[in-house]
Amino acid sequence: MADPAIARLEVKRLLDRAAACRDQGDRAGAIASDRSAILLEPQSAVAYASLAQSLQVAGRLAAARRSWERAIATGLAGGARAEALARWELGQLLWQLGEPDEAIEQFLQVAQLDPATMSLQTLEDLSRWLRRRDRRSAAGQIDRALVAALVPSVRQLMRQGDWSAAVGWCLRSLHIAPADDAPYNLLFDALNGLGRPDQARDCFCRLIPPELVAEFVPPAEPIATLPLATDPAAGVAIAWEPPRPEPYELPAARSILPDRPLGAFPVLSPLCEPPRQLVAIEQGRAWVDTYNRVIWNRAGAVVEGLGIGVDRLIATSDRLPSPTPIAGNVAVIAKQHTANYFHWVVEFLPQVVELLDYCNQTGQAIDYWYFDGRSLPFQTNSLTALGIAPDRCLTSEQLPHLQADRLWVFNTASLIEGCRSSLQNLRDRLLPQPPTRPWRRLYLSRSQSRRIVNEAELQPLLDRWGFETVPEGLSFTEQVMLFSEAQWVLGPHGAAFTNTLFCAAGTRILECFAPSYVSHFYWRLSRQLGFDYGYLIGDSVALSDDPLIKSLSQSMGFYQDLFIQPRDFEQMLDRWFSGTT
């Protein structure tokens, strides 16, 4: 009996010889060497794959097809990647043989096994070919493969310095998955590579500049659009325009310690709410996801002034699910970043309250509320507190695209956190009877980014002044109650300050920042609602070791932690409580 180890060595020698013969143009020699290897090891998938290549070079395509099929059936070493490569070769061969349907079946299996086996352009071309033949299900599989292959493929383009191609593919992938996080994050790196840091920051914040879309993925045909105005023929009506309030000024933000650095707070004085409109659209259609919103009228024209995010990319896409018909009136209350507590409470919930008030005044009925939601506890709990049951909520996770008998949509002109009356309406709906004398001293700790890293060192001072750390895991209504009893609120910048919305007038707010990022959100919120606001800028600390967090901290400063000297912290509390700020 022949020694198996010697036989394997001889098989390898024969396959190496076959490869050399192919390189030299010796087709007959290559085929002969491959067949000798198969005689020695009849179950060698590698030998059948080598024979398939030799037969292809010789132009014997039908025989090459059988060899590829045998190689795949025998089982190639190397797992999914090796099988994907073999099926890719077989698919291309079948295409040459004039059997496109069989070829597509192989390509679909490649897409499932290892999408990166095929180039992004090949996946794009296959998807288009399938859609032209109304094979939407198969095209959808290829589209999902393109999204899966995007990160390694775009990273490779960036390593090669092809920044423009990287940007283009990221934007084109948003035709398929406009809420996928990967393209936005990749655009941050690619646009920085092109020397466009401002656009890079916008994209990381999920705000794709329209000029970027026009430059890299211009639509093949103009998009049908409709101005935002009452137009009975188009089925669009401005149902309600709240009166605009008189302009008002916001007192300046003050540093609690005069010898500490000052923050660059924007000039927002005088401040006036922009025009707000509630729009009714008969037989309207809506696309909603985490970052985007597009509204069409019954004729398929995009209604201007109602879109959010990459509405132009979505409007020109033929690669998204078809709309689901919904009987009844649907309120589209969708804004970006609703998984973030701040955005949910100060941008989303005030719109819900305004529409509830409008319905009460006019007798209109809302059958369903449609929004980007993930059924997070604070979302469902807050909606329940406003009297909206879960069975009346439609979320984009389950239903990204719908068409209803009538849509109710607010325009996008207003930043809700700048609407004092809207914030006050929300307070009136949710606040319990306020205590006659708020008394709590609340400290808002953070466990991840933007932490005060020496918090443990400062704890004795917090204890001395009677601060309680707000625990994690409170329900929405428990947070409302807790903050309604607060007299003093202190902590590093973060979403927990959103709950100061429910504090009593006159509550004293003190917010701490890292030098790299000073936000005006809670100053603006506090000053509109009659709170006493101050801030402190601490000292910088070393950046995170995480490459992404480090990059973001360097370019945007969002996530950097801070350090506060105990002597500064003590002086800060002394001045704060003595009222000498």
Image (cartoon, rainbow, N blue to C red):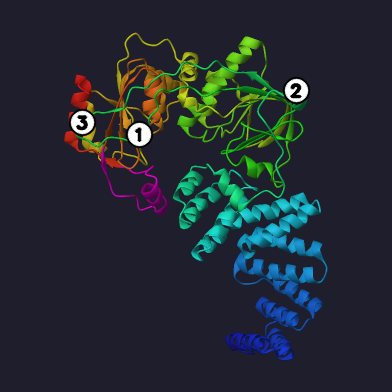
In terms of depth relative to the viewer, which is nearer, 509 or 482? 509
CA gap, disc 3 to disc 2? 60 Å
Depth check, mark 3 against mark 1: the one in front is 3
Number of labels in the image equals 3
Answer whether residue 482 is visible to the viewer in this image.
no
Tell me which numbered mark, 3 or 1, is placed earlier along the sequence.
3
Kindly check if marks 3 and 2 are in contact, taking CB atoms under 8 A apart as contact: no
Looking at the rendered structure, the secondary structure element under dot 3 is loop
Q: Quadrant of residue 516?
A: top left
Would residue 497 appear left or right of 416 to someone viewing this image? left
Residue closer to the observer: 234 or 335: 234
Question: What residue range appears in magenta?
Answer: 538-561
Closer to the N terminus: mark 3 or mark 2?
2
Q: Quadrant of residue 254?
A: top left
Residue highlighted by disc 1 = 493
Task: State yes or no: residue 542 in magenta.
Answer: yes
Depicted 60 relative to depicted 511: above or below: below
Residue shown at 17% from the left, 29% from the top: 571
Q: Amino acid at mark 2?
A: Pro
In the rendered view of the protein, which quadrant contains the C terminus?
top left
Residue at which label 2 appears: 232
Q: Position of residue 432 (x, y in %)?
A: 44, 12
Q: Which residue is mark 3?
A: 258
Residue 149 lies within the magenta run: no
Crowding at mark 2 (Cα within 10 Å: few <14, some 14-19, many 20+): few
Task: Report the Cα–Cα distance between label 3 and label 1.
Answer: 20 Å
